[in-house]
Amino acid sequence: MVQKSNTKECPSCAMDIDPKAEFCPICEYHFPKRNPVYQWIAILLAILMLMLMLF
């Protein structure tokens, strides 16, 4: 399914909804809030692992 850039897909019911929605209005699935700190830690760990594998 091609997803429009101004919507996101609910993993529970596959409906396209507003990307800023905290829950799906159809099935009431609550989207988990992502902490950007965890994302940066994961990126840094991935870079570190790649560097260790190369050297």
Image (tube, rainbow, N blue to C red):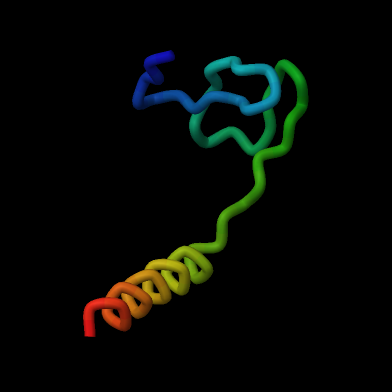
Residue 27 on image: x %, y %:
76, 20
The one nearer the camera, 39 or 24, is 39
Q: On the image, which quarter does residue 3 sit in? A: top left
**Quadrant into which the N terminus falls:** top left
Residue 42 on image: x %, y %:
46, 68
| 13 in relation to 45, above or below | above
> Does residue 13 appear left or right of residue 54 in this picture?
right
Q: Residue at x 59, y 33 (%)?
A: 21
Q: Residue at x 49, y 32 (%)?
A: 19
Q: On the image, which quarter does residue 26 sit in? A: top right
| 11 in relation to 13, above or below | below
**Quadrant into which the C terminus falls:** bottom left
Q: Residue at x 42, y 69 (%)?
A: 40
Count of numbered badges drawn on the protein: 0
The one nearer the camera, 43 or 20, is 43
Residue 11 on image: x %, y %:
63, 28
| 48 in relation to 38, above or below | below
> Does residue 6 appear left or right of residue 14 in this picture?
left
Q: Residue furthest left?
A: 55
| 11 in relation to 37, above or below | above
> Does residue 46 appear left or right of residue 20 in this picture?
left
Q: On the image, which quarter does residue 49 sit in? A: bottom left
The one nearer the camera, 25 or 35, is 35
